[in-house]
Amino acid sequence: MNPEPQVPEPIAVIGMSCRTAGADDAEALWQLLRGERRLIGPVPEQRVPAVDAGPVEAQPLQAALLDDATGFDAAFFGISRRMAAWMDPHQRMLLELTWHALENAAIAPERLRGSPVAVFAAAPMADYRERMIQADVVDSAAFPGTLITFTANQISYQFDWTGPSYAIDSACSSGLSVLAPAVQGLRGGEFSLAAVMAANITCNGFYTSSAYQAGALSPTGESVPFSTRRDGYNRGEGGACLLLKRLADAERDGDPVHAVIRGIGVAHNGRAGGLTGSDAPAQTQLFLRTARTAGIPLSSVGYIEAHGTGTGGDLAEATAVTDALRTTLATPRTQAAGPDGKMWIGSIKSNIGHLEAAAGLLGVVKAVLILRHGLIPPIAGLNRPDPDLPFGDMPVALADHPVTWPRGAAVRRIGVNSFGVGGALAHAVIEDAPEVTPGTTAATCSAPMAVPLSAMNRAGLSALATRLLRTLGGPQPPDLNSLAWTAQTGRATLRERRVLVAADLAELTGALAAVAAEQAHEHVVDADHKGALGPLPADMAHTAGDWLDGLSVDWAKHWPDPQPSCPDLPGYPFQRRAHWFDANGPAPRTPTTAPHAVTH
């Protein structure tokens, strides 16, 4: 008798950060998605200079741009202004995103120094280097600043991580392909933590011009995936970083688990799709193989976050999804695993454009958000679906309206699909995080609590307090114990420090308001007024005083097991300033060039 195939170990997403047009973090991105906003807007000429559409009759360039591509908090990372100016903006963004992903996982970066953390980054476009060449300027700082390898190696160096570190280039599937070596290495025990990341920023006209003339870009800027307005893609900017760990290790260590990666597969069309096209049968086989090696039926996937670029590849992708599902259902009319018995299809590119090398990883972020919020947002702007889509009588449907998908008895699963212009394919299956076992109550500490806050300076401290105030005023504020635990053990210790002494959230809110306004308050303690720590238990007051004095302390010793959960607190408020290799860098967007927000 043949042994049962071994189900590969599930991988947990324990930290997540992102930044796109219109959104500085995951929660802002979710509001954008559920609001069906399209962030496609006019591109100022200086932002992407020297665009030449050639014989293509193109309207003025449209894209989904970041508000500020030049901004970076170089001082926070100890990087000189000169080095920052000659550093590719992809590297700058990934440094900030990695920091925020660590905070989201409640991991203080200093805990990982010298650890074999792996870094896998999607190789970005070379727009910044091409812009230097066009300007005919060079500097020795451009040597590490523009080499693609430093997309990953800069991260490993900055955080002092010793695991494997390299960039992966499979064009537009790079952002999903980075999951493959991370998942494989985690399962094989090569490392215990991996950071996967991707970013995309456009600042030179060379690629845009060639893509226009090759018919890849939309000449109208009105393209919508899977619609009759399908005339090419719109470029988008942004990035994401995920921290991955074996699920068993994450549960043992008390890490937050946002979702689980059940499977990841990569492949290539061979010659079937042509040099720059995509082939439906190759995608079909990849879908089936990914599900099979993950030990699940493909029919258990209820939603596909499609590559969905708004090009001819949409029809091939829709065909691949339909054919793959057909092979796994008893009859065409058998129900699929999604809401209303269907497998739904959507694409984030209708909201924020095509992030090219970062597109696949933003698809994973969207999948995690769908599972978290129990809602499939619609394809923004999809007024007229393409009548040639090959769904027939199969239980496959476009997400042309919001579809509720609450957590139930069956595990919800999402397929994330991506393919590159060179024929490289990638597909991942993301599923629900395990439910927390009922009756497991975290230990608490006696009130009042010590909530430490630190930043690089007083302005940063004020901005951080302002962000926390918004969180406490939100619909689901964290409890005091969870917030204090995360602030004590899950954040870096920076130069400007305060300890907030609070017996409840009302007292904490008052203390945060004072810090935000840079005012004195009876519950806000600095190193010169440690006597105000008196209301705390004596041992915690001693620890808090040492922390204010700049000493290394062990907050965790005050917390009996099981420890509190880590709430989703806002990330550090970087104080960005413009860094560019010359004085003619693109200015931040102004209201006259802001993208239009279309609600469908």
Image: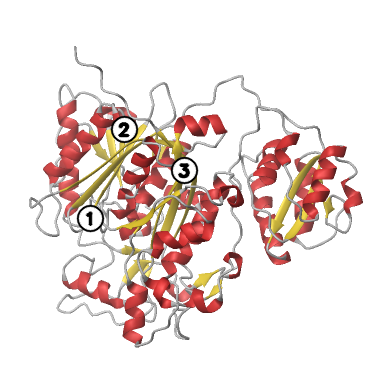
Does residue 179 appear anywhere in the picture? yes
Q: What residue is shown at x 24% (from left), y 16% (from top)?
A: 3
Q: Which residue is mark 3?
A: 193
Lateral position of residue 212 relative to residue 489, left or right: left
* Rendered location of residue 157, percent (x, y): 49, 60
Circle 1: element type = loop
* Rendered location of residue 104, percent (x, y): 55, 47
Lateral position of residue 353 relative to residue 547, left or right: left
Amino acid of disc 3 = Leu
Closer to us: 28 or 424: 424
Question: Comparing marks 2 and 3, which lies closer to the viewer?
Answer: 3
Question: Comparing marks 1 and 2, which lies closer to the viewer?
Answer: 1
Q: Are marks 1 and 2 in contact (CB under 8 Å)?
A: no
* Rendered location of residue 151, percent (x, y): 40, 62
CA separation, marks 1 and 2? 24 Å
Sequence order check, earlier mark of 2 and 3: 3
Circle 2: element type = loop
Lateral position of residue 40 relative to residue 470, left or right: left
Measured along the vertical axis of the image, is residue 22 above or below residue 79? above
Question: Comparing marks 3 and 1, which lies closer to the viewer?
Answer: 3
Amino acid of disc 1 = Gly
Sequence order check, earlier mark of 1 and 2: 2
CA separation, marks 2 and 3? 29 Å
Q: Are marks 3 and 1 in contact (CB under 8 Å)?
A: no
Amino acid of disc 2 = Gly
Measured along the vertical axis of the image, is residue 75 above or below residue 31? below
Q: Which residue is mark 1?
A: 420
Structural crowding at the residue carrying mark 1, measured as other residues with C-alpha within 10 Å and reported as few (<14), some (14–19) or many (≥20): many
Sequence order check, earlier mark of 3 and 1: 3
Q: How many marks?
A: 3
CA separation, marks 3 and 1? 27 Å
Q: Which residue is mark 2?
A: 302
